[in-house]
Amino acid sequence: MSETLHESLRQAHEAARAWLARCLRADELYLGADGGMWVFERDALGAGCLELAYAPEAPCERATAALTLPLALPPVATAEDAHALLGAAAALPPGVAVTELGLATDEHTPAVTARVPAEALSTETLDALYARLAKAKHFLEDDAR
C-alpha cells in the first residue's frame, strides 16, 4: 500500500505503521499519494491523530508528519477564553502548537499538535513527540481548571 504514497513519505509511513501497531487501537482514515491519516488510541489520553502529508505548494513546500492529541477544555466562548488559551499556549514546549481536531465531523475540538519533517520520522521520534504532547496537554488542561 505504501507504493501509492509519494516517495518522500514512504520511510515515514513505515515508521508510522510500526508506531501505530503498538497502540491500543489504530484506524486508517485515508491513504493516498499525498499522505495518510490515522486515528489512534494509545492510552488514557484519548483518541489522537497521526497525519503524513506531501504538500509541495506554499506554505508547506515539503513532506511532513503531524501528531495531534485532543484537549479536554471547555468551549472557547468569549474573547477572554481565547486570550487565556493563547496566553497559556505561549508556554508550550518548542514545536507544539494549539490547533483543532476535526476528524471528518462537524465538531472541532481544541488540540495540541507537533509537526516534523517526514524524513525525521521514526518510532523513537513519535514516542518523543507523544510524550511532549502529553506534557503540553496536561499543562493546558491543568491551567484551565
Image (tube, rainbow, N blue to C red):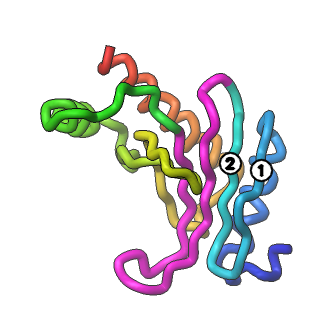
Where the N terminus falls, by quadrant?
bottom right
- Checking the image for residue 139, the label placed there is none
Question: In the image as oriented, which residue stretches furthest toward the front?
Answer: 106
Residue at 48%, 57% (x, y): give it. 115
* Residue in the foreground of this view, choosing between 145 and 15: 145
The residue nearer to you, when weighing 91 against 25, is 25
| Residue under the image location 42 percent in, 48 percent down | 100
Q: Which mark is residue 39?
A: 2
Q: Position of residue 36 (x, y in %)?
A: 67, 66
The residue segment tinted magenta is: 44-69
Q: Residue furthest top?
A: 145
- Taking the image as shown, residue 77 lies to the left or right of residue 106, namely left
Cβ atoms under marks 1 and 2 closer than 8 Å: yes
Q: Which residue sits at x=55%, y=44%?
A: 129
The residue positioned 64% from the left and 37% from the top of the image is: 47
Dot 2 amino acid type: Val
Q: CA distance from mark 1 to mark 2?
A: 5 Å
Residue 27's tag is: 1
Q: Amino acid at mark 1?
A: Asp
Q: Compared with residue 36, is residue 138 higher up or lower down, i.e. above or below?
A: above
N-term-proximal mark, 1 vs 2: 1
Instruction: In this rendered view, identify the residue nearer to me: 89 or 131.
Output: 89
